[in-house]
Amino acid sequence: MTDTETLLTGLAARVQLLEDQLALMRIISAYGPAVDSGESAAVAGMWTEDGVYDVDTGCLRGHGEIEAMVQSKPHQSYIHAGSGHLVGPPHIDVDGDTAVATCHSQLVLHDQETRTYRVARITANRWEFARIDGEWKVTLRTNRILDGRAEAREILAAGVKN
């Protein structure tokens, strides 16, 4: 290869990585607005058909269970009282057609009586992705509450190791 070909190949790889990271950030950043507006199909559509959302309270498997969570009475009560699922900037590692993102998230709830907000929970998040037919999808999202348990710290530590 010539120097120009080597340069172009390197630049193309860097641009692809940046495009992949941006696409993954767009999925992660869309989660909060989608789940807080009750757009259950949009939330579920972020996952593969057989994707898993593993929260400390249980595992949701596939689009149907993820949609049902958004449509559930407890989640709808959050929405109608005022809620914000805030996801922090992710640390993303792309490896070909798979990727892992690590970040924090918090659930902020509105108290209608006092007209204040409170942080209901803060979690460590691991998002696993696969590129399927050119589109990134979540295959597994694992959330663990940051309440001193080692499991949550381990998610964060694993996500930033080189």
Image (cartoon, helix red, strand yellow):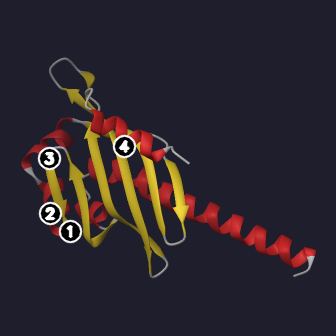
Q: Are marks 1 and 2 in contact (CB under 8 Å)?
A: yes
Name the mark nearer the viewer: 1 or 4.
4
Label 4 amino acid?
Ile
- Name the quadrant containing residue 137: bottom left
Q: How many residues crowd around disc 4 within 10 Å: few (fewer than 14), some, or many (20 or more)?
A: some
Residue at 36%, 43% (x, y): give it: 155
47 displayed left or right of 62: right
* Mark 4 or mark 2: whose residue is earlier in sequence: 2
Q: How far is the residue under mark 1 from the one under mark 3? A: 20 Å
Q: Are marks 1 and 3 in contact (CB under 8 Å)?
A: no
Q: How many residues crowd around disc 1 within 10 Å: few (fewer than 14), some, or many (20 or more)?
A: some
Q: Which residue is mark 3?
A: 76
* Mark 1 or mark 4: whose residue is earlier in sequence: 1
Disc 2, SS: helix
* Mark 1 or mark 3: whose residue is earlier in sequence: 1
Label 3 amino acid?
Gln
- Quadrant (top left/top right/bottom left/bottom right) for the N terminus: bottom right
Q: Using the image, determine if residue 161 lies above or below residue 137.
A: above
Q: Which residue is mark 2?
A: 65
Q: Are marks 1 and 4 in contact (CB under 8 Å)?
A: no
Outermost residue, right side: 3
Name the mark nearer the viewer: 3 or 2.
2
Label 1 amino acid?
Gly
Q: Which residue is mark 4?
A: 155
Residue at 16%, 68% (x, y): give it: 64
In this rendered view, identify the residue nearer to me: 52 or 63.
52
Q: Which mark is residue 62?
A: 1
35 displayed left or right of 66: right
Disc 1, SS: helix
Name the mark nearer the viewer: 1 or 3.
1
- Name the quadrant containing residue 56: top left
